[in-house]
Amino acid sequence: MRCAVVTAAGTTKNADDDNGTPEPRRGGTAADAPLPRPLLRSAVELYLDLHAHPELSGHEHRTAARLAARLAGHGCAVTRSVGGGHGLVGVLDNGPGPTVLLRTELDALPVTEATGLPYASTVPGVMHACGHDLHIAAVAGAVELLAASRTTWRGTVLVVGQPEEETLSGARSLLEDGRLYERFGVPDAVLAQHAAPLPAGTLAHAPAGGPPLMAGSVAVEAVLHGRGGHAATPHLNLDPVLMAAATVLRLRTVVAEATAPAEQAVLTVGSVRAGERGNITPDHAELSLTIRAFTEPALDRLAAAAERVVRAEAAASGAPRAPEFTVTARSPVLRPDPALTARVRRAHEALLGPGRVLDLGGSAATEDFPHYASGGVPAAYWMLGTAGAGPWRTARAGGAPVPPNHAPGFAPDVRAALPVGIRALAAAARRVLDPGPAGDREATS
Ligand SMILES: [Zn+2]
Ligand SMILES: [Zn+2]
């Protein structure tokens, strides 16, 4: 079954309209009933606090401290400042056995929240618009669940709180500068989940043999140089705003020209910065763009085409200096390990029933999570539905689309999504860890 997806572009694709896509769950369902109330209350409290106090990439000090305190409270040995930033690692050691790594991101986005929620961001211009607060609360809850049932499993749970995911730099900092695997051991499996505008109460995995779950990306900063001056003397200036405008229009043709019709790719110019006032022609303009595709050669091809356009438009405008074209980040295509995904998926189907575990592939979203799989470490990654029943029905009826991640209106249905997120992570971890002496008695996580 293909699921219905509210795409990042805000449109609704209903691939399986009338006989499959489940409705979002409300809180208090059979699936979340076994979670102890104090555990759930504590996870919700953490979520609400983090949501109200978001921190941008590279500034996740408070967020890291809150997660560290939770992990320490559940018996983890916590190491802070791994990788030179706010990265943290919690180790829940439960004797000899496999090691499973649970990863959550810590950072928020430069977005002004417009949800109107009572627990909305208190930080002007900053919002947890990607759901990383939900991921943190879910990992804290999952660790609490695992710690409370440690007689039923053996091994080590390694929790990684990763800063700077939105800039696609945090995973590499942890793995390379922080020597994550050298210091804490190479895990037998790496697991992560991500909030998505699918029905709350569902999970989604990449189908076996299907497209990758997420695209790879190339992030670019380009600087176009002109000649500044008085706005009333255009004949003496060389306007970089005009150069930038022409460049943006031409860049938007790159995907059409450089990809085959069946190939999926995206090139978006997300930021254009030039000048201060209407009566001054600035001397330069800056563009930020992201390129997304599902193979490394396609990423290379599109990046080369984008650079050619930027340089050619500058030359065509008579720019006094060649533009700078800098690749600032690159993330690999996210293709979860098929065997591990199959095991995790079975755990999720046992948890929620097969009807609430969906297939999803080909999202043009991107992640730096694939770096954790470097060197052949098996990694599984799934989407956690967050769309509430009301917004979902409205979107299905042709009304306003469910606000996707990164939108000012992004508002996960926490009561429905968080319990599933906690249990999905704990259940997946258990599939990797050794069942302990009382392992066959565990049933609910
Ligand atoms: Zn994001
Ligand atoms: Zn995210």
Image (cartoon, helix red, strand yellow):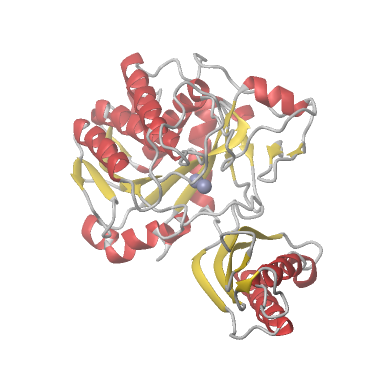
Q: Residue at x 38, y 57 (%)?
A: 170
- Asked if residue 95 can be seen in this view, the reply is no
Q: Nearer the viewer, residue 205 or 82?
A: 82
- Which quadrant of the structure image shows residue 438? top left
Q: Is residue 159 left or right of residue 213?
A: left
Q: Position of residue 325 (x, y in %)?
A: 56, 76
Q: Residue at x 20, y 39 (%)?
A: 76
Q: Is residue 316 left or right of residue 365?
A: right
Q: Which quadrant would the C terminus be assigned to in this image?
A: top left
When the figure is inspected, residue 165 is found, relative to residue 416, above or below; the finding is below
Q: Position of residue 52 (x, y in %)?
A: 40, 30
- Which quadrant of the structure image shows residue 179? bottom left
Q: Nearer the viewer, residue 314 or 380?
A: 314
Q: Which quadrant would the N terminus be assigned to in this image?
A: top right
- Which quadrant of the structure image shows residue 124? top left
When the figure is inspected, residue 195 is found, relative to residue 37, above or below; the finding is below
Q: Residue at x 47, y 20 (%)?
A: 118
Q: Position of residue 280 (x, y in %)?
A: 61, 66
Q: Is residue 390 left or right of residue 438?
A: right
Q: Position of residue 261 (x, y in %)?
A: 82, 63
